[in-house]
Image (cartoon, rainbow, N blue to C red):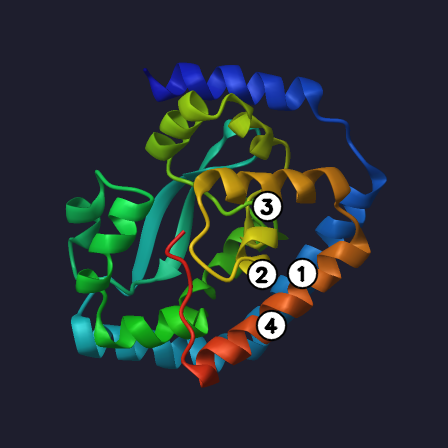
Amino acid sequence: MNYGSLAERYARLAFERHASRRVDVALRGLDLAIAGVSLLVLAPVAAIIAALVATTSGRPVLYCGERVGRYGRLFTMRKFRTLRPDAEQRLGPFYGAALDARTPSEVTRIGRWLRASQLDEVPQLWNVLAGDMSIVGPRPIRPRFFEELCEEMPQYWQRLVVRPGLTGFAQTRMGREPSWSEKLAHDLEWIADRSVGLYLRIVGATAWRVVRQTFGGGRRSHA
């Protein structure tokens, strides 16, 4: 199946069936405020991380990957690179459990720390400012995986009615590697119940999780 035709079909469904809410304006304001302040505060940390990545594993410093955004629009998601050079080509055909099993062998030494602390995702704050992403929402997914998951779970297109996020219910609630259907259930719950209060609770839970993983040796999902 051609991604273009699939994207057009589901983008049209998402756009036509999306009921705009006043709360979305407030959530976008929070996105801009949190992303802007975070980028200013984390700028020195980001510079150090960039230097560490370049020194320990060469260039490029950033990983840039195509993802499916709101209404099916494709965008380039950016992260600090945590995998060995050309790992994307080797891991590209896999997702889910198969991807999780193969990823650890590709992670660099500095990459393990970045993933544990989630500091590899700092560049995604630029995606938030640009309007590609939100702080809270379903995690962005590769176009190819979106195709396959829509075939397995026809309701998967409903994720397109909001911007993909840096964090969400699935990332803060699950104590183990969740299945794609479990992730989708949490994503759809956020879409249905999204509010300023819920947004702030998820941001707070994410901040606590980052602290716990950074200083407590926890690990996170590869999704």
Identified at 36% across, 34% down, the residue is: 145
Image position of 135 with respect to 24: above or below: below
Q: Earlier in the sequence, mark 3 or mark 2?
A: 3
Q: Residue 71 appears at what percent x and percent y?
A: 57, 28
Labels 1 & 3 near each other (Cβ < 8 A): no
How far is disc 3 from disc 2 in space, using C-alphas? 23 Å
- The residue that label 4 is drawn on is 207
Identified at 84% across, 40% down, the residue is: 22
How far is disc 2 from disc 1 in space, using C-alphas? 7 Å
Quadrant for residue 84, please give it. bottom left
Q: Nearer the viewer, mark 3 or mark 2?
A: 2
How far is disc 1 from disc 4 in space, using C-alphas? 9 Å
- The residue that label 1 is drawn on is 202
Q: Residue 26 appears at what percent x and percent y?
A: 80, 50
- The residue that label 3 is drawn on is 131
- The residue that label 2 is drawn on is 172
Give the residue type at disc 1.
Answer: Ile
How far is disc 1 from disc 3 in space, using C-alphas? 19 Å
User: Which of the labelled discs sits on residue 177, or is there none?
Assistant: none
